[in-house]
Image: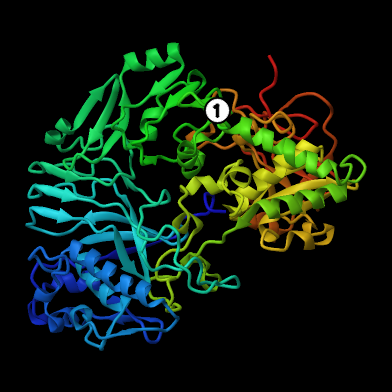
C-alpha cells in the first residue's frame, strides 16, 4: 500500500570534485573518504559493477571530457549534457524497436566507455559525473531521490540534476531537503527541471506479469506523478543568488520558501489577494499564499479563483482556508500541476469552474482525473461516484438479492470491480529478495530492459501519486477502453462503497503495507481482497477465491473518504477526536483490530508492535461508551468484540458504539 509503507532510505555521499578531471594522484583525500567507490551498469551482463573513483573517472578521461558537449553549448560535462546524451541514446532504442539484450553498434560519439556500443551504460557514467557535487538519499519504496546537500565549491551557476544513478537504477529527484544549498554565498543562479519520462521505457519488465516491450503513452513527457518538493531554508545564506529556474511541478514546505535569499522576494507577486511565486524564466507561476482579506472574501462568496497565468496550485494556499466555505473553484487552463490533496475534504465543493463533474468539459475532466486525490472527499467527486454506485448496484440486483444471497452478491461485487479496474504493482528495491533495505553493499542486478527506470503506475500513467488511493479511483480513472489503474487502497475503498450500497456488512481494513476488506457473510467474518484478484478473469472469480480467513493483525481502519456517501457514512469506521477532527495533523485514533483468537500469541503481538496483550471477550451494549482508559478493541470472527488490557492513554477522548463504528457522540 503505497502511502502507508515505511520509507526505506540509503544515504549516499557523492564526490566533491573540481570541474576539471584530476589525475588520481591529485585527488583530494576527502573525496576518497567520501566516495569509496561508485557504480556503473554492465549492460551485457545485466549487473551493477562497483568501481573505485579513479577507474570511474578514467572512462570519461579516455573518452575525452571535451567530447561530452552533447547539448552543443561549448561547455562539456554539464547536467544538460547528460540530458542530451540520455535522450539521444534512448531515441536510438526507440527507433530500432528495443529487444531484450540488444545493444546498438557504432555511434562512437556516444560511446563513453569505448566498448563499441551506444547503451544506457554510457549515459549512466556521465550522470554519475554530473551528480558528483550532491549528497542524496534514496527512498526505496517510492523510488525517488532527495538531494540533502550541495557540496560543490566556487561555482556561480549550478544546474541541479533531475535524476541520479545509484543501486543500478535511475531515481527521479523529487525532494530538496531543508537547507540543502545553505551557506553558498558564491551562487548566483540555480536551475531545476521537471523530471521527464524517458522515451524508451516499457510498461512492465518485472515479475510474473511482465509485458513485451511497448512504448509507454507518457514517453518524453512530464507526468503528474513526479514533482519537486522544497524544504525550508533551502537557500539560506545564498547572498549572491539572483536567478532561479523552477520546474512547474513544484511544492514547498512553507509559504516563504526563499526566506534566506531576500533578493528573491521580488519574485513574488500579489494578484487579487493571492500571492504567487514566479521564476526568472517567466514559465512558473505558483499560487502559494493568501491575504487575510482574500480569506474573508472566500468565506463570504464561497468561491476561489486563480489568475489565468497560474501554472501550479500549492497546498500551502488551500490549507489556510475553512474547508466548509468553498463551494466552487476556478482552475484556469494554464494550470499544469495541483499538489496532492490540495482541495481534499472541502466537502461543500460541488463545482469546478461552475460545472459539476457530469457537466465538465473533456479538458477539465482530464485535469481532474490527473489530480484526482486533490478532490478527495468533495461533493464534486462524491456526487459522480454515488451515481456510478447506483448503476453498479442495479447491475448486481439484476443478478441476485444481496439480502438473501450474500455470498453471490459479494462475488458480483468482485467481478464488477475486476472488470472496471486493474491492479498495477510497483517496482521498488525494498521488495527485492524479501529485504526491506538492500543495504549499501548489496549491488543490484537487473534485466537489460527498462527496469533501469521506475515503472510504477504513476510513472507510466499520467496520474498523481495519491490518485490510485482515492475512493473514486476504480469508478473514475478508467474509460471504455482502459481499466482504471489503482492499488490496494483504491480497491478497498471501492469494495467498501459498493458492498455498503448493496447492504452487505463490511469493514475497511489494513495489514502491514496493505489494505483490504472484511465482509460478514453467512454469519461469519471473511477477508475480501480485490488487490489479489484484480488481474484474474472476472468470470473466473467465485466465493472460493474471493472470501478468505481473517488474518492476525488485520486492523479496522478509518477513512474520511466515506463521509459523503449516504450508504457508507455510518456503516464504515469513522474516527474523530473531540478536540480536533482534522486527521491530517498526524494524530491517529484508537485502533480496532480484527483477530480470530481471544488471546494473541507473542508473534502476533510483536507484529502489531505491542507486547503483553490479553483480550477478554465482551459484549458492548447499545449506546455510547467513552474510551477514557484508551483500551484497544479487537473483533473476533463471530463479530463480537474483544477488549485489550493494554491501555495507553489516547491523544483525546474516543468513543465507540455497538455497531462497530467510531464517531463523535451527538450533543
Q: Where residue 582 sits in the image (x, y, percent)? A: 53, 29
Instruction: Give the farthest residue toward the bottom.
Output: 116
Q: How is the rendered protein coloured?
A: rainbow
- As rendered, which of 188 and 538 lies closer to the eye? 538
Residue for badge 1: 356
Left or right position of 629 against 624: left
Q: State the residue at coordinates (37%, 31%).
A: 332
The quadrant of the image that shows the N terminus is: bottom right
Left or right position of 130 against 408: left
Q: Is residue 291 above or below residue 249?
A: above
Q: State the residue at coordinates (71%, 42%).
A: 496
Q: Is residue 354 above or below residue 151?
A: above
The quadrant of the image that shows the C terminus is: top right
Left or right position of 386 against 239: right
Q: Where residue 120 sits in the image (x, y, percent)? A: 32, 75
- As rendered, which of 189 and 526 lies closer to the eye? 189
Q: State the residue at coordinates (42%, 79%).
A: 448
Residue 609 can be seen, yes or no: no
Which element type, helix, strand or loop, lies under badge 1? loop
Q: Is residue 47 above or below residue 609?
A: below
Local packing at callout 1 (Cα closer than 10 Å; few below 14, some 14-19, many 20+) is some
Q: Is residue 66 above or below residue 315?
A: below
Left or right position of 314 against 572: left
Instruction: Give the farthest residue toward the right.
Output: 404
Residue 458 can be seen, yes or no: yes
- As rendered, which of 471 and 538 lies closer to the eye? 538
Amino acid at each position: 500500500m503505497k502511502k502507508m509503507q515505511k520509507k526505506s532510505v540509503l544515504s549516499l555521499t557523492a564526490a566533491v570534485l573540481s570541474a576539471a578531471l584530476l589525475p588520481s594522484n591529485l585527488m583530494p583525500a576527502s573525496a576518497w573518504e567520501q566516495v569509496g567507490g561508485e557504480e556503473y551498469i554492465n549492460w551485457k551482463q545485466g549487473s551493477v559493477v562497483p568501481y573505485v573513483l579513479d577507474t570511474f573517472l578514467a572512462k570519461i578521461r579516455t573518452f575525452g571530457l571535451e567530447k561530452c558537449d552533447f547539448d552543443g553549448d561549448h561547455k562539456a560535462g554539464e547536467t544538460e549534457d547528460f540530458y542530451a546524451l540520455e535522450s539521444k541514446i534512448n531515441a536510438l532504442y526507440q527507433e530500432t524497436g528495443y529487444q531484450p539484450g540488444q545493444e546498438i553498434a557504432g555511434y562512437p560519439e556516444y560511446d563513453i566507455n569505448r566498448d563499441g556500443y551506444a547503451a544506457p551504460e554510457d549515459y549512466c557514467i556521465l550522470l554519475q559525473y554530473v551528480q558528483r557535487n550532491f549528497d542524496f538519499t534514496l527512498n526505496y519504496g517510492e523510488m525517488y531521490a532527495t538531494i540533502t546537500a550541495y557540496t560543490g565549491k566556487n561555482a556561480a551557476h549550478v544546474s541541479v540534476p533531475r535524476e541520479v544513478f545509484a543501486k543500478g537504477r535511475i531515481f527521479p529527484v523529487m525532494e530538496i531537503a531543508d537547507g540543502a544549498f545553505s551557506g553558498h554565498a558564491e551562487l548566483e543562479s540555480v536551475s531545476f527541471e521537471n523530471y521527464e519520462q524517458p522515451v524508451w521505457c516499457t510498461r512492465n519488465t518485472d515479475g510474473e506479469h511482465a509485458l513485451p516491450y511497448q512504448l509507454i503513452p507518457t514517453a518524453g513527457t512530464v507526468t503528474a506523478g513526479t514533482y519537486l518538493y522544497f524544504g525550508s531554508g533551502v537557500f539560506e545564506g545564498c547572498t549572491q543568488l539572483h536567478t532561479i529556474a523552477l520546474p512547474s511541478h513544484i511544492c514547498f514546505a512553507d509559504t516563504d520558501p526563499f526566506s534566506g535569499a531576500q533578493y528573491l522576494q521580488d519574485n513574488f507577486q500579489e494578484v487579487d489577494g493571492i500571492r504567487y511565486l514566479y521564476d526568472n524564466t517567466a514559465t512558473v507561476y505558483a499560487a502559494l499564499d493568501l491575504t487575510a482579506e482574500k480569506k474573508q472574501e472566500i468565506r463570504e462568496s464561497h468561491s476561489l479563483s486563480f489568475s489565468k497565468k497560474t501554472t501550479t496550485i500549492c497546498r500551502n494556499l488551500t490549507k489556510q482556508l475553512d474547508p466548509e466555505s468553498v463551494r466552487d473553484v476556478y482552475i484556469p487552463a494554464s494550470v499544469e500541476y495541483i499538489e496532492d490533496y490540495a482541495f481534499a475534504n472541502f466537502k461543500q465543493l460541488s463545482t469546478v469552474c461552475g460545472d459539476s463533474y457530469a457537466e465538465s468539459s473533456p479538458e477539465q475532466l482530464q485535469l481532474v482525473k490527473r489530480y484526482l486525490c486533490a478532490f478527495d472527499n468533495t461533493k464534486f467527486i462524491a456526487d459522480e461516484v454515488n451515481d456510478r454506485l447506483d448503476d453498479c448496484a442495479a447491475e448486481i440486483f439484476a443478478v441476485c438479492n444481496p439480502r438473501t444471497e450474500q455470498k453471490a452478491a459479494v462475488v458480483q461485487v468482485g467481478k464488477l470491480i475486476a472488470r472496471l479496474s486493474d491492479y498495477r504493482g510497483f517496482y521498488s528495491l525494498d521488495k527485492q529478495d524479501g529485504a526491506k533495505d538492500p543495504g549499501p553493499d548489496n549491488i543490484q542486478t537487473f534485466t537489460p530492459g527498462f527496469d533501469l527506470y521506475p515503472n510504477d503506475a504513476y510513472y507510466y500513467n499520467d496520474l498523481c501519486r495519491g490518485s490510485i488511493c482515492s475512493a473514486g479511483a476504480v469508478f473514475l480513472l478508467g474509460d471504455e477502453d482502459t481499466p482504471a489503474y489503482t492499488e490496494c487502497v483504491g480497491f478497498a475503498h471501492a469494495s467498501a462503497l459498493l458492498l455498503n450500497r448493496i447492504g452487505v456488512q463490511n469493514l475497511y481494513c489494513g495489514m502491514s503495507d496493505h489494505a483490504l476488506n472484511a465482509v460478514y457473510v453467512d454469519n461469519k467474518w471473511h477477508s475480501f481482497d480485490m488487490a489479489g484478484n484484480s488481474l484474474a478473469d472476472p468470470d473466473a472469480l467465485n466465493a472460493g477465491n474471493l472470501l478468505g480467513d481473517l488474518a492476525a493483525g488485520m486492523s479496522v481502519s478509518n477513512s474520511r473518504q466515506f463521509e459523503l456517501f449516504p450508504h457508507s457514512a455510518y456503516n464504515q469506521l469513522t474516527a474523530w477526536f473531540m478536540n480536533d477532527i482534522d486527521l491530517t495533523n498526524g494524530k491517529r485514533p484508537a485502533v480496532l483490530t480484527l483477530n480470530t483468537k481471544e488471546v494473541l500469541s507473542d508473534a502476533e503481538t510483536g507484529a502489531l508492535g505491542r507486547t503483553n496483550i490479553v483480550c477478554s471477550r465482551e459484549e458492548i451494549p447499545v449506546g455510547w461508551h467513552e474510551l477514557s482508559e484508551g483500551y484497544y478493541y479487537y473483533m473476533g470472527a463471530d463479530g463480537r468484540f474483544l477488549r485489550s488490557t493494554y491501555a495507553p492513554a489516547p491523544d483525546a477522548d474516543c468513543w465507540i458504539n455497538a455497531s462497530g463504528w467510531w464517531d463523535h457522540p451527538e450533543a
